[in-house]
Amino acid sequence: MREASSKIVPRDMLQSKLAEHRRRRERIVFANGCFDTLHVGHIRYLEGARREGDIVVVGVNDDSSVRNLKGPGRPILDQKARAHLVAALRAVDYVVLFSEASVEALLEELRPDVHAKGTDYTAETVPERATAARLGIRVAIVGDPKDHSTRSFFDSVRKAAHD
């Protein structure tokens, strides 16, 4: 089994690594998220992504994009810690950090076979659905019903601290 840190790959190196997997006719799945503290929903999402193909690449939002998406006080964990936690999961083959508001540019660059999104989306609400369709990337909704979130986890911790 590979060390987690070896799975974290700079964007410019990832394309050549994926080219080798394509030569072996392995199906590449792309998933993404902030992963600001891992919870069971994240694990089930990434395990669901794994069932869609052979190689799972996870885009992790960098610190500035998490702040823009989630607001003040976030992320709790810095991008290196979040990337390392995701990379440590057995379902994950590669982790790449990204700073854009959406993963459309990564879909263009990496051209995965499948774009896996969590169950908080539907086929109609995936933000990158038009880009995926144009590139011939299948969108798969994976994971369990969205009844866990980092925000609700933090809310329960705050409530417990005040009780």
Image (tube, grey):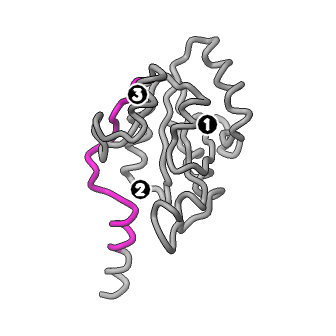
Q: Look at the numbered disc 2 and give the secondary structure of its residue.
A: loop
- What residue is shown at x 53% (from left), y 32% (from top)? 107
Tell me residue 4's x, y (percent).
65, 44
Residue 39, label in figure = 2
The quadrant in which residue 129 appears is: top left
Q: What stretch is highlighted in magenta?
A: 137-156
Distance from disc 3 to disc 1, alpha carbons, whole Å, reads 16 Å
Counting residues from the N terminus, which is met first, the one under dot 3 or under dot 1? 3
Residue 114 at x, y percent in the picture: 45, 26
Residue matched to label 1: 94
Crowding near the residue tagged with mark 2, few <14, some 14–19, many ≥20 C-alpha atoms within 10 Å? few
Q: Which of 17 and 131 is in front in this view?
A: 131
Identify residue type, mark 1.
Tyr
Can residue 151 be found in the magenta stretch? yes
Does the residue at mark 3 contact the one at mark 1 (Cβ under 8 Å)? Answer: no
SS of the residue under disc 3: loop
- Residue 13 occupies which quadrant of the picture? top right
Rendered view: 132 above or below 80? above
The foreground one among 39 and 107 is 107
Residue 49 to residue 5: above or below: above
49 left or right of 21 in image = left
Mark 2 is on which residue type? His
Residue that label 3 marks: 51
**Foreground: disc 2 or disc 1:** 1
